[in-house]
Amino acid sequence: MTNVVSVALPDAAFEARLREVLRSRVEFIELIGEDLIKAGGKRTRPMIALLAAQALGLTPGSASWGHALDLGVCVELLHSASLLHDDLIDNADTRRGQQSAFRRFGNVVSVMSGDFMLARLLGLLSGLPAGPALTRAFGDTASQICEGEVLQFQVAAYADYTLPHYLNIIHGKTAALTELAASAPALLLNSPQAQLDALGTFGREYGLAFQMQDDLLDLCGEEHLIGKPIGGDLREGKATLPTLLLLGGPHAAEVRGVLERRAAQPGDVALVLRLAEQSGALEQTRQEIRRRARLAADALQALPVSEARAALSALAIREIERTR
């Protein structure tokens, strides 16, 4: 990620704690939990939580470090539960290169295993300092995730494509959880309001930039690099930022037609991509991603200078670099 080497990131101790929390008397739940651990992933959200805790002065190995690890586990559990539900909603065959849980075990097992993860994170939160405040924050975030997912379906169903709807959707899909990951350590440590606000801004703007970049690559990325066919959002009737910019211009009728028929005609995706390139919508999107990422990095100036703060800033800078 960066050249920073002296900060603590999710490691074997984190994975062991995650495995302990996911332990169940029921084999199918155990197997889904084990799949989560083996699949790994980047652990970006717990990494943000651990870096934020260190940026606020918590020292790895200290008496309170276990609280930070548990908070990171809670963030990962909320993320993983949402993915189990998302895969079912999206009818996804795979997750991180493996067969999705609902394909392997069925709908009921997948949904209830996600609910099991939510129950376990509530148990963890109850034992942490500032437990009530953290529980409220996690509850609010879970609500936002649900609202974002449902709003995405509602917008597609009504063809009600607007920038406010889009921002609400990607906040729910991605930024709400990165905002929680970044700001929850400030609640845990009872940090000053200015630091809580700064980390919340970092997480929110970083998450928005990250999702906008993913949406951009869905339209103009290279399939062998992003691991899926381009144009998936158009085929699902989802209007992302480049498409919204086109809907505000002279090609609105053409683009709306593509969205409403879910890019069902040959050449639909190529048409939208060509119009986005010619109109400058792709470059405008890149500029917005850079702006959001800079807002994220700038927000961290409210924190003391540290290697952990530098590592968080590097995440935002990476989104700027990905637009080039």
Image (spheres, rainbow, N blue to C red):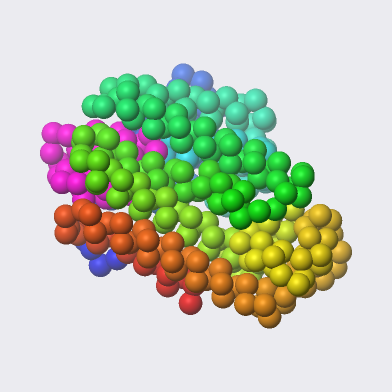
Where residue 179 appears, x then y in whole percent?
Answer: 40, 45
Magenta span dominant secondary structure = helix
Q: In this view, does 277 lie above or below 313?
A: below
Seen in the image, is 188 located left or right of residue 152?
left
Residue at horizontal 45 percent and vertical 23 percent from the top = 119
121, 193: nearer the viewer? 193
* Quadrant hosting residue 184: top left
Where residue 101 appears, x then y in whole percent?
Answer: 60, 37
> Number of numbered discs present?
0
Q: Can residue 98 be seen in this view?
A: no
Residue at horizontal 13 percent and vertical 34 percent from the top = 63
Seen in the image, is 207 located left or right of residue 247?
left
Residue at horizontal 32 percent and vertical 35 percent from the top = 71
Q: In this view, does 99 lie above or below 122?
A: below
Where residue 245 appears, x then y in whole percent?
Answer: 65, 66
Identity of the residue furthest to the top in this view: 25
Residue 61 falls within the magenta-colored stretch = yes
Which range of residues does the magenta coloring cover? 48-75
Residue at horizontal 76 percent and vertical 66 percent from the top = 252
Q: Can residue 291 be seen in this view?
A: yes
Where residue 277 appears, x then y in whole percent?
Answer: 66, 78
| Quadrant in the picture for the N terminus | bottom left
* Quadrant hosting residue 233: bottom right
324, 221: nearer the viewer? 324
* Quadrant hosting residue 297: bottom left
Identity of the residue furthest to the bottom in this view: 278
Residue 68 falls within the magenta-colored stretch = yes
